[in-house]
């Protein structure tokens, strides 16, 4: 079955960077998109960006451009999300979520990773 | 960007009674591929979101048939025919038709 397993919790200082990984299994990796979504404590879901797992081409939400980088490693079926210039407002649970097959239309998601808590604290 | 507006934001329901959540989009969600990319997610306390409904009205595998989705254009709804205790959580709509994808604010379902 489709599984997305994310890396463990992180604690970072303001101004630092964080990398969250998402290891995929149970589907043909290169034929899908992968999204990243975050959820601050007690808040709703905020979409961050998407990466084409075939070409590796990412697209980011305007809010995060210049601070976020999404990459993938086809050899290990792993997706990475790097977020730099962390502030206290970046404290959140970061999740990967599988998107649509590349050959189909739309930007929906189906299966989610378990989430990675990133805490920004001085 | 497309704004997704859910109502109500809080939904107290008696066990066994029906519940309905509305989701309105600021643009028509009909895609050029012929589909309408409106999904519903359930987030139980302490868990990651789980997709319940895709493309307006299609239930995901394993989702109880008490959950149903309907709507078109800019107006959509998630209905639970008879609420059970295990349904307590937050429900989100998401549009995947227009760039960038966007979520509703979430509706918190609780038992009265």
Image (cartoon, grey):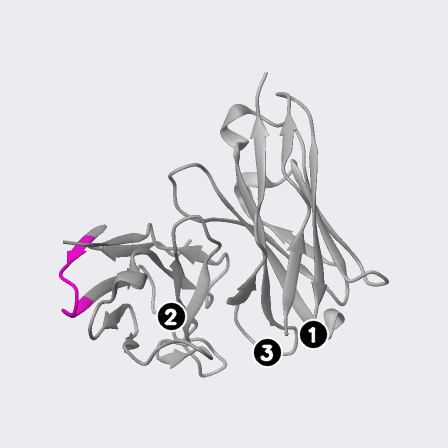
Q: Is B39 contained in the magenta span?
A: no
Of residue A50 and residue B64, the one placed in the foreground of this image is B64
Locate residue B77, reporting x and y percent.
25, 69
Of residue B45 and residue B51, the one placed in the foreground of this image is B45
- Alpha-carbon span between mark 3 and mark 2: 16 Å
Q: Residue at (45%, 77%) from the top-left corner?
A: B60
Residue numbers of the magenta segment: B11-19
Labels 3, 1: one chain:
yes
Q: Residue at (59%, 78%) from the top-left corner?
A: A104
User: Which dot marks residue A27?
Assistant: 1
Q: Residues within 10 Å of mark 1 (few under 14, many from 20)?
A: few
Select label 1 or label 2 by which is in front. Answer: 1
User: Is residue A11 shown above or below A32?
Assistant: above
Locate residue B100, reporting x and y percent.
50, 56
Q: Residue at (48%, 58%) from the top-left corner?
A: B101
What SS does tag 1 mark? loop
Select label 3 or label 1 by which is in front. Answer: 1
Locate residue B108, reporting x and y percent.
27, 52
Q: Residue at (16%, 64%) from the top-left corner?
A: B15
Q: Which residue is mark 2?
A: B29
- Alpha-carbon span between mark 3 and mark 1: 16 Å
Quarter location, residue A100: bottom right
**In the picture, which quadrant includes the C terminus of chain B?**
bottom left
Name, please, the residue furthest toward the right: A75
User: On what subunit does the disc labeled 1 rest?
Assistant: A
Q: Which residue is mark 3?
A: A104
From the viewer's perspective, tell me whether residue B54 is left or right of residue A22: left
């Amino acid at each position: 079955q489709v599984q997305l397993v994310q890396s463990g919790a992180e604690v970072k200082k303001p101004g630092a960077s964080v990398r969250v990984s998402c290891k995929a299994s149970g589907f043909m990796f290169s034929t899908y998109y992968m999204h990243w979504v975050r959820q601050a404590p007690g808040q709703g879901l905020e979409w961050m960006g998407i990466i084409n797992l075939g070409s590796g081409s990412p697209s980011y939400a305007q809010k995060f451009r210049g601070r976020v980088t999404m990459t993938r490693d086809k050899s290990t079926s792993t997706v990475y999300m790097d977020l730099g210039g962390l502030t206290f407002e970046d404290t959140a649970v970061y999740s990967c979520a599988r998107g649509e097959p590349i050959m189909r239309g739309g930007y929906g998601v189906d299966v989610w990773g378990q989430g990675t808590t990133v805490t920004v604290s001085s | 960007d497309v704004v997704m507006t859910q109502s109500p934001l809080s939904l107290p329901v008696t066990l066994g009674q029906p519940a309905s959540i509305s989701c309105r989009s600021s643009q028509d969600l009909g895609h050029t591929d012929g589909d309408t990319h409106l999904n519903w997610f359930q987030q139980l306390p302490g868990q990651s979101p789980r997709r319940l409904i895709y493309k307006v009205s299609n239930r995901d595998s394993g989702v109880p048939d008490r959950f149903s989705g309907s709507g078109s254009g800019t107006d959509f709804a998630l209905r639970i025919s008879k609420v059970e205790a295990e349904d307590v959580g937050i429900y989100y709509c998401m549009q995947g038709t227009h760039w960038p994808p966007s979520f509703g604010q979430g509706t918190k379902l609780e038992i009265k």
